[in-house]
Structures are given as structure tokens and as C-alpha cells.
Image: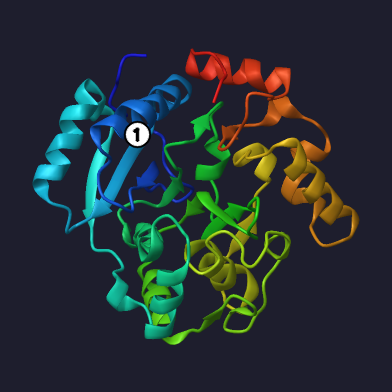
């Protein structure tokens, strides 16, 4: 695919505002080898499927300009496909001391930097953002995600009640400010979750703790789904918008549905084995269902191996 800048003409949100795909690099701009291995294949697949919308690459305002320049150079002509945004983000100093200590002792890849992606809520010049990670592949247009008036929507995770790799974000400064305030005033425990609200399936089946429940995945779950608020939120079908399954995981989630611990709607496409409906692929293995493997190959133009 030839890189082409998105015009975003006529590709607006329900209230006429701008829309975009958004990637937040929590550890700053990716290194050259990461650009080659992950970022360019991500952009290539996205451009083959949807070349109309902007793609935002966001990172901290404190990122050295030299580091950003190296990434721009590594992107080559693909730089025309993205809009780079430097944003003020959450730092370790914004976390309560006890939370800082818990995050420091966790084995999460990015520690407190996981919270930096919350800064997407501050990009109020956009009406709707669909947040993706660069290890995802867009298999078909997802216009319906940009047409929602939801403040936030995500999918269940493999070992967490929410996976933050893909989400609908409706930027709102009031939401962002409340999040920053919560990181300082709220509590977290591996046993009782955020503010004592408890851990949720399938976190409880993943060992001592869920994946990133002490950082953004658990925080977003509590912020939007466990506590009382006036925001408009939804849960999306993981199998359509954030496919991250292997056989073992599908068996676990199906078992949770049969026990009444998980709503069938959050893995609807998988329950029906409607593999042709998968729109966003996240984590996958080489043993994809044949229909899905063919769909991935058509979207990316390469062999469907991981």
C-alpha cells in the first residue's frame, strides 16, 4: 500500500467533530526496529482497510526531540499517514504513594507509564477516538465505532475484566481531570481491587493478580464500570473488536458465560463462531480459524502468521 494522508473529509463524529485512530506510545516514540517490525505493518494494514481517517501517534510532551526525529526518519514515507501529538501526561508523581509502591512492585511492562494513555481524554479537538495498539490489525472498516455518543467503551480482556488495547474514547477534560484526581485519592489492593470494589472475572482466574489491574486496565474498569457516575459507557464484543483468543481462553470465557459470571454479548461472535465478523485482531496464534486467517491475509497482503 502506498502511504496516503487521510483527508478526514466527511468522516466526522455524530456531532460533526473530527475522528481518528489513536496510538499512545507510553515509553515514547518507538525505536527504529520497532517501527519496522510493528508500526509500519500496522499502518500498512490500516491504510489498506481505511485510508480515510487520521491516525494520531501520541507521546509525552517531555520526549526528547532527537528521539522523535529518529522515529520520523524510520517511518520514511509513512510519516505522511500520521499526525504526531505531544501531550501533557500523567507522571509517577500523580500517583498516591501507596499506589506508586504497588505499581513499582508489579511485573507490568510499563509500570506507571501505562496511565499515560489516559491523556487521550484531553484531546478535545477530536470528537471520537478509537484507541489501538500497534500489534493490532484492522481487518475491515469500523465506522460504527466512530458514530457512537458513548464516552467510553472497551472489551473484556484475556486475564482482566477490561483490555485497554482497543477502546472508544470521547475526549472530555472533566473526565481526564477526575481520573487524575482519582489516581491520587483512590486506593488499590491486589485482593480487593480499586477502592475495595473487588476484582472481576476473568481476573480471579489468572493467579495472584490480573493483567495490569493495578494500572490502566483495572483503573478504567473501576472508573467506568464498577462505581457510580453519569457517563455513558458500553462494553463491546471482544471477538469482533479485539480478538485475542486461543482455544484455552475461549474455553475459559465460554465457561464463565455458562456460570453466569460473564455476559454472552461480550464474546458474541465467538459464541456463534462467526469468524468472518472479526474486525480487529489483537493477539493471535498461527492456528486461526481458516476464515479468519484468509481475512487477515486479505487485509494485510501478507501470510497470516504471528
Q: Position of residue 249 (x, y in %)?
A: 73, 44
The N terminus appears in which quarter of the rendering? top left
The residue at the point 57 percent across, 34 percent down is 280
On the picture, is 289 further left or further right than 228? right
Answer few, some or many: residues within 10 Å of disc 1's Cα (few below 14, many 20 plus, some between 14 and 19): some
Q: Position of residue 112 (x, y in %)?
A: 37, 66
The residue at the point 31 percent across, 68 percent down is 90
The C terminus appears in which quarter of the rendering? top right
- In this view, 280 is above or below 174: above
- Front residue of this view, candidates 245 and 14: 245
- In this view, 265 is above or below 143: below
On the picture, is 73 further left or further right than 301? left
- Front residue of this view, candidates 43 and 175: 43
Residue 227 in view here:
yes
Residue placed under numbered mark 1 in the picture: 8
Number of on-image labels: 1
- In this view, 4 is above or below 169: above
Q: How is the image coloured?
A: rainbow
Q: Position of residue 122 (x, y in %)?
A: 33, 62
Query: Residue placed farthest to the bottom in the image?
Result: 185
The residue at the point 44 percent across, 42 percent down is 133
Secondary structure under the numbered disc 1 in the rendered image: loop
Q: Position of residue 119 (x, y in %)?
A: 34, 61
Query: Residue placed farthest to the left in the image?
Result: 66
On the picture, is 266 further left or further right than 74? right
Quadrant position of residue 52: top left
Residue 7 in view here:
no
Amino acid at each position: 500500500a502506498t502511504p496516503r494522508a487521510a483527508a478526514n473529509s466527511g468522516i466526522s463524529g455524530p456531532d460533526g467533530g473530527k475522528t481518528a485512530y489513536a496510538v499512545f506510545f507510553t515509553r515514547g516514540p518507538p525505536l527504529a526496529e520497532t517501527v519496522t517490525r510493528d508500526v509500519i505493518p500496522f499502518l500498512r494494514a490500516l491504510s489498506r482497510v481505511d485510508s480515510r481517517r487520521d491516525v494520531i501517534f501520541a507521546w509525552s510532551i517531555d520526549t526528547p526531540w532527537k528521539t522523535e526525529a529518529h522515529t520520523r526518519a524510520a517511518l520514511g514515507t509513512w510519516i505522511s499517514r500520521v499526525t504526531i501529538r505531544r501531550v501533557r501526561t500523567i507522571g509517577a508523581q500523580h500517583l498516591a504513594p501507596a499506589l506508586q509502591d504497588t505499581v513499582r512492585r508489579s511485573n507490568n511492562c510499563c509500570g506507571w507509564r501505562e496511565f499515560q494513555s489516559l491523556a487521550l481524554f484531553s484531546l478535545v479537538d477530536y470528537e471520537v477516538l478509537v484507541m489501538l495498539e500497534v500489534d493490532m490489525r484492522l481487518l475491515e472498516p469500523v465506522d460504527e465505532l466512530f458514530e457512537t455518543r458513548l464516552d467510553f467503551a472497551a472489551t473484556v480482556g484475556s486475564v482482566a475484566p477490561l483490555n485497554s488495547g482497543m477502546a472508544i474514547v470521547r475526549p472530555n477534560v472533566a473526565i481526564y481531570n477526575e481520573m487524575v484526581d482519582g489516581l491520587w485519592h483512590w486506593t488499590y489492593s491486589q485482593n480487593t481491587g480499586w477502592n475495595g470494589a473487588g476484582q472481576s472475572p476473568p481476573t480471579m482466574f489468572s493467579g495472584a493478580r490480573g493483567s495490569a489491574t493495578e494500572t490502566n486496565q483495572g483503573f478504567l474498569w473501576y472508573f467506568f464500570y464498577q462505581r457510580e457516575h453519569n457517563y455513558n459507557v458500553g462494553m463491546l464484543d471482544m471477538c469482533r473488536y479485539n480478538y485475542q483468543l486461543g482455544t484455552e481462553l475461549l474455553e475459559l470465557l465460554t465457561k464463565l458465560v455458562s456460570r453466569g459470571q460473564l455476559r454472552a454479548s461480550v464474546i458474541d461472535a465467538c459464541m456463534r463462531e462467526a469468524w468472518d465478523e472479526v474486525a480487529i485482531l489483537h493477539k493471535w496464534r498461527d492456528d486461526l480459524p481458516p476464515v479468519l486467517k484468509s481475512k487477515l491475509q486479505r487485509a494485510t497482503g501478507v501470510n497470516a502468521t504471528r
